[in-house]
Image (tube, helix red, strand yellow):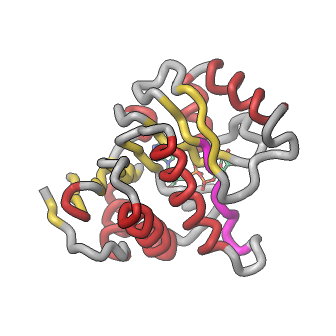
């Protein structure tokens, strides 16, 4: 099942983020950048040591104190189909002094801005923060779709944003609560 929005620039699908053949996939990382569970574990596990080594370099240079919530960095994709991994740290729900929505939106906007800066045309996202970081899926749907919509209004480099949900029910929840301006067209 796939559904698209914004004249096909956004595609909603069910699948495994590590299997996506977009130019970049986005990792739901934590501030250490050195791996964890869920998406993070899957990407590092399948992408291999090259990703970890590059993340370590970023920690030793640009972000010695860790990647702040909402920011994004890019590494090679290692053994993944995707050429690059964009690592972003989502907000832990309820732990950001009322800035959860702003920080979640930053994850999507900053990841897309980084992709455009590197001239990458296609980016796949997992559902940032809706797992171990406990962001309610219906709230995350509204925020992520708004942030993506706002970015795509300003950009003409990124031609495909693929939103990859790990289950049909997660995808349905997103479709129910998304806030894209143009209506859905289900293929
Ligand atoms: N492909 C696509 N989606 C996935 C996959 C996968 N392989 N694995 C998990 N998901 C989904 C989860 O079901 C959830 O909806 O991705 C969403 C994000 O879940 P998490 O990976 O737990 O990410 P997050 O909630 O942002 O928490 C990040 O968890 O894994 C650790 O190191 C990570 O500390 C960080 C924290």
Camera-side residue: 129 or 181?
181
* Residue 100, magenta (yes or no): no
Q: Which residue is situated farthest in the right direction here?
A: 65
Q: Residue furthest left?
A: 187
The image position of residue 6, as x and y in percent, is 25, 64
- Residue 37: x, y in percent? 64, 42
Q: Quadrant of the C terminus?
A: bottom left
Write down the region rendered in magenta: 87-94
Image vertical order of residue 47 relative to residue 180, above or below: above
Q: Is residue 10 left or right of residue 164?
A: left
Looking at the image, is 33 positioned above or below residue 153? above
Magenta stretch: dominant secondary structure = loop
Displayed quadrant of residue 94:
bottom right
Instruction: Establish if 3 lies above or below 23.
Output: below
Within the magenta stretch, is there residue 93? Answer: yes
Q: In the image, 146: left or right of 156?
A: right
Residue 46, percent from left and from top: 52, 25
Residue at screen point 71% across, 58% down: 69
Q: Name which residue lies at 37% across and 61% down.
A: 152
**Residue plotted at (69% across, 76% down):** 99
Where 17 falls versus 48 (above or below)?
below
Of residues 174 and 63, the one drawn nearer to the viewer in this rendering: 63
Q: Is residue 48 left or right of residue 180?
A: right
Q: Residue at x 24, y 73 (%)?
A: 182
């Amino acid at each position: 099942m796939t559904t698209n929005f914004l004249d096909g620039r956004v595609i909603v699908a069910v699948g495994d983020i590590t299997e996506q053949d977009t130019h970049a996939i986005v990792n739901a990382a934590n501030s250490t950048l050195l791996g964890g569970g869920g998406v993070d574990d899957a990407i590092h596990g399948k992408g291999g040591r090259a990703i970890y080594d590059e993340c370590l370099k970023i920690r030793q240079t640009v972000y010695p104190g860790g990647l702040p919530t909402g920011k994004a960095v890019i590494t090679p994709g290692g053994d993944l189909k995707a050429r690059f991994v964009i690592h972003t740290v989502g907000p832990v729900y309820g732990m950001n002094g009322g800035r959860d929505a702003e920080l979640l939106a930053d994850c999507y906007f900053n990841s897309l801005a980084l992709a455009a800066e590197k001239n990458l045309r296609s980016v796949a996202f997992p559902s940032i923060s809706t797992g171990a970081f406990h962001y309610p899926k219906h709230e995350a749907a509204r925020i992520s779709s708004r942030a993506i919509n706002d970015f795509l209004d300003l950009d003409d480099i990124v031609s495909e944003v693929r939103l990859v949900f790990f289950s049909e029910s997660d995808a349905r929840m997103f479709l129910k609560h998304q806030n894209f301006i143009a209506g859905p067209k289900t293929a």
